[in-house]
């Protein structure tokens, strides 16, 4: 059987599950600290203008302070109506179009065909791909958050407000690693959303989604937060670097980029993905992540992601036994707990710091880590060029290594 994972408006991604040997199963669930795909971002960053950019960032970055106050928590059975009335005007439809060029098969360049068709055979064919997604307004002057895949490669971006106004949008920046993008329209005094705090979410809380699924504008669905901290590997999107919120609020193609709200009308996530064929399995990017990324995109047009450059897996007694009993594994482990380094990328920050395959990471900056997602989270929350202290075990000995995370390369290391 295949579980089909999809980002809205994107082709299905097939995640195959095989019954392999324990080592292969462990390898299949490896979490890369350098998770992600290549990024093409609008704008640029000039090292000589860091102070100016910092000043711009403070003026432009998304701020909860300037957002409209949230609706007070209510026991009214019609609280969803209040949320929709408050937030609905700030939810938009985003239509994008892109030109895709494709060359004709080489057979058409054969002299035999040229003899009959001559110059009438075009060298390439162009086709227009169109997509529809959602977004939400975060500032009165027209800054909008949406998914990167909604506007990826778009030649034109059109934003339609709930009141029917249609405006051309400009992509200020996008980040493929987190699937966050910022679009700008020229307008003033627009309705805005209030941002919540996704770090405080608990499974079982109310979740309200507003968006434009399948072209049905301003659709509202409700459910709960089913889980928090779902890794990109768990939902079948290993090229992303997000710990997702899971919800059973109905999400469909076209909901991508729309807001997931709490019972007070605060945005707690950005709807982004579903598992095709499943019931009640939708996923959203936590708003704290989207806010952090969007602030960098607004300020500089791009995002710097810290990375170490290692492949790793959480160590268990079962995995230890499998590795030690397999002569082809290339690894011998004496530890039962921690995060096993399976591979170190050449010339990566980890390689330069002396980290080796077979090392078992026990702590990062003094904090115990027990799984790969914990290491990834610690690295993501660090700064490029800052120092991380890695405490690890190697061949029964304790080592303490300083490592400075680098900026994630624009093209993924293989």
Image: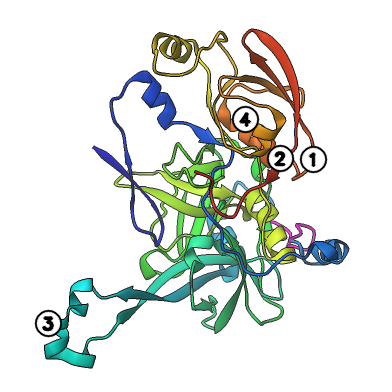
Instruction: Give the distance between the C-alpha atoms of the residues marked 4 and 2, in whole angstroms.
Output: 15 Å
Instruction: Give the distance between the C-alpha atoms of the residues marked 3 and 4, in whole angstroms.
Output: 62 Å
x and y, in percent, of residue 28 in the image: 41, 31
- Cβ atoms at labels 1 and 2 below 8 Å apart: yes
Q: Circle 2 sits on which residue? A: 405
- Cβ atoms at labels 4 and 2 below 8 Å apart: no
x and y, in percent, of residue 222 in the image: 47, 51
Q: Circle 4 sits on which residue? A: 374
Mark closer to the observer (4, 2): 2
Report whether residue 106 is seen: yes
Q: Which mark is on residue 112?
A: 3
- Asked if 295 appears above or below 376 in the picture, the reply is below
Mark 1 crowd level (few <14, some 14–19, many ≥20, 10 Å Cα): few
Instruction: First in sequence, mark 1 or 3: give its number.
Output: 3
Under circle 2, the secondary element is loop
Instruction: First in sequence, mark 4 or 1: give its number.
Output: 4
Instruction: First in sequence, mark 3 or 4: give its number.
Output: 3
x and y, in percent, of residue 283 in the image: 47, 47
Under circle 4, the secondary element is helix
Q: Is residue 187 left or right of residue 279?
A: right
Q: Which mark is on residue 386?
A: 1
- The boundaries of the magenta stretch are 62-70
Report whether residue 257 is seen: no
């Amino acid at each position: 059987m295949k579980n089909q994972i999809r980002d809205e408006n994107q082709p299905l991604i097939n995640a195959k599950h095989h019954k392999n040997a324990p080592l292969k199963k462990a390898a299949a669930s490896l979490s890369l600290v350098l998770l992600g795909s290549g990024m093409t971002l609008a704008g640029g960053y000039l090292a000589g203008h860091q102070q100016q950019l910092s000043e711009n960032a403070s003026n432009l970055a998304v701020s909860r302070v300037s957002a409209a106050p949230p609706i007070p928590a209510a026991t009214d059975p019609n609280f969803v109506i209040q949320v929709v009335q408050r937030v609905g005007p700030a939810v938009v439809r985003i239509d994008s179009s892109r030109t895709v060029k494709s060359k004709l098969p080489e057979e058409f360049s054969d002299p035999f065909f040229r003899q009959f068709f001559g110059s009438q055979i075009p060298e390439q064919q162009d086709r227009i791909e169109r997509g529809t997604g959602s977004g939400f307004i975060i500032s009165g002057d027209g800054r909008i958050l949406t998914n990167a895949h909604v506007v990826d490669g778009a030649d034109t971006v059109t934003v339609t407000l709930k009141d029917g106004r249609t405006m051309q949008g400009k992509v200020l920046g996008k980040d493929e690693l987190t699937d966050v993008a910022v679009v700008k329209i020229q307008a003033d005094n627009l309705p805005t959303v209030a941002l919540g705090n996704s770090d405080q979410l608990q499974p079982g809380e109310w979740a309200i989604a507003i968006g434009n699924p399948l072209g049905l504008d301003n659709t509202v669905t409700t459910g709960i937060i089913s889980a928090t901290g779902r890794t990109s590997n768990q939902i079948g999107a290993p090229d992303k670097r997000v710990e997702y919120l899971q919800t059973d609020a109905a999400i469909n193609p076209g909901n991508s980029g729309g807001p997931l709200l709490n019972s007070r009308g605060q945005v707690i996530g950005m709807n982004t993905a579903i598992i095709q064929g499943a019931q009640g399995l939708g996923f959203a990017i936590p708003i704290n992540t989207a806010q952090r990324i969007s602030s960098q995109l607004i300020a500089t047009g791009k995002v710097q992601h810290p990375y170490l450059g290692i492949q790793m897996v959480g160590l268990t007694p079962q995995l230890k036994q499998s590795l030690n009993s397999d002569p082809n594994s290339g690894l011998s482990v004496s530890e039962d707990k921690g995060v096993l380094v399976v591979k170190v990328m050449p010339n990566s920050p980890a390689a330069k710091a002396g980290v080796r395959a077979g090392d078992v990471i026990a702590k990062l900056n003094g904090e115990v880590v027990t799984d790969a997602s914990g290491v990834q989270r610690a690295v993501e929350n660090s700064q490029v060029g800052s120092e991380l202290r890695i405490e690890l075990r190697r061949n029964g000995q304790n080592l303490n290594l300083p490592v400075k995370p680098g900026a994630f390369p624009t093209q993924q290391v293989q």
